[in-house]
Image (tube, grey):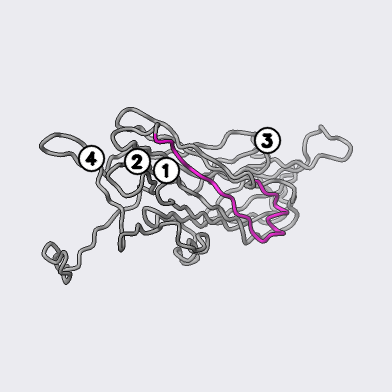
Amino acid sequence: MTIAAAISGQPSAGAADSAPTTVTTPPRIVDADHPVSRVGAKVPIESLQRLKARPAKTPTLPTLTEHGQVTAKRTGATYERNLDHYKDGVPSGRMDVAYDPVNDCRAFLDSKVGKKVVDRFRYCSVSRWTYNHVEVATGRVLGTATYLQTIAGQAPQDRREIYYMVNLGFFDIQGTVPKTGPLEVSGISSGYRGADGSNVACEVTNSATNPQMLGQCLANGNVVATIVFDQNKSLGYGRDFLSRCGVATSTCVGKYCGEFTDADTSIRFDSASYLEGASGGVFDAAAPKILYDPRSAAHGAVATQS
């Protein structure tokens, strides 16, 4: 997630247009190299002086690889393999099955931090983030806000859409942190260069309820933001109207965004006439598998014992 850098300033009394006396630094991931700051510790003053509003970072992803294509030897025509995994005729991960995607994601990662494309219809990311509230004059940390971020991605059936559900919860506040600064989670996208030279990013729709004050998050215990990535069929290329793009999330506090992104992955849409359903979307970084049962009368002849 390009998580948010916020100057949520607390101006000095009686001076509405004066320089802020405190700032909120950009949220960052918590790991062995970036632990949560200690209240009372100091951050470099020059790092505070460099804080400025900047646009969200665009996800950078590798060059498109047409890993799903095959070429007919006789005609030279290019076709797309149907690599989706079906069980009893139903695509795994279809969204009309009722379940809690956020908790399903945490259960899949066994309550650990990490990220993974579960299958072609589901994506999961769990990570810890933190940001500081700092006194400008001294660089002293007045307080820290740390939280768990869970992102559950889903591909609905028969639509050129991918959904991200972003959950912010399990907040741990140390010291003093303003509760009025909005935590705004939004989606960002970049385009892949397709076979015809196209390089169109996905359309991104962020829920109008996504921006949430820290105080609201604390009062509710957690907050969920909804992001939709989609691409119109007319912008696709080739016989199947393919669209591929990179997607990620970005978080801003106030008007200031940091340089971290989360849930960076690639997605694909197509509208192939020879597949069930008019259109569809998948997380194309998944590695599809075909399983054969040598005991099956239906395909035992082509299966081999491993």
Q: Earlier in the sequence, mark 2 or mark 1?
A: 1
Task: Please tell me the numbered disc located at residue 160.
Answer: 1
Q: Nearer the viewer, mark 4 or mark 2?
A: 2
Could you say where residue 132 lies in the image, as x and y percent from the top left? 67, 50
Side (left or right) of 69 relative to 17: left
As rendered, which of 216 and 156 lies closer to the eye? Answer: 156
- Residue 80, how many percent across, how many down? 25, 42
Is residue 216 on the magenta stretch?
Answer: yes
Which residue: 20% across, 42% down?
70
User: Dot 1 surroundings within 10 Å: few (below 14), some, or many (20 or more)?
Assistant: many
Tell me, yes or no, whether the two marked residues, 2 and 1, touch with CB atoms within 8 Å.
yes
Residue type at tag 4: Tyr
CA gap, disc 4 and disc 2: 13 Å
Determine whether 97 is above or below 177 in the image. Answer: below
Q: Are marks 1 and 3 in contact (CB under 8 Å)?
A: no
Give, as a three-letter code, the residue at label 3. Answer: Gln
Q: Which residue is mark 2?
A: 271
What's the mark number on residue 79?
Answer: 4
Question: Is the C terminus in the top left, top right, bottom left or bottom right quadrant?
Answer: bottom left
Q: Residue furthest bottom?
A: 295
For the record, the magenta segment spans 211-233
N-term-proximal mark, 4 vs 2: 4
Tell me the mark number nearer the camera, choosing from 3 and 4: 4
291 vs 14, left or right, is: left
Measure how far apart labels 2 and 3 are at the Cα level: 50 Å
> Cβ–Cβ below 8 Å for labels 3 and 4?
no
Q: Earlier in the sequence, mark 3 or mark 4?
A: 3
Q: Please give the residue where the numbered disc 3 appears in the rendered image.
A: 49
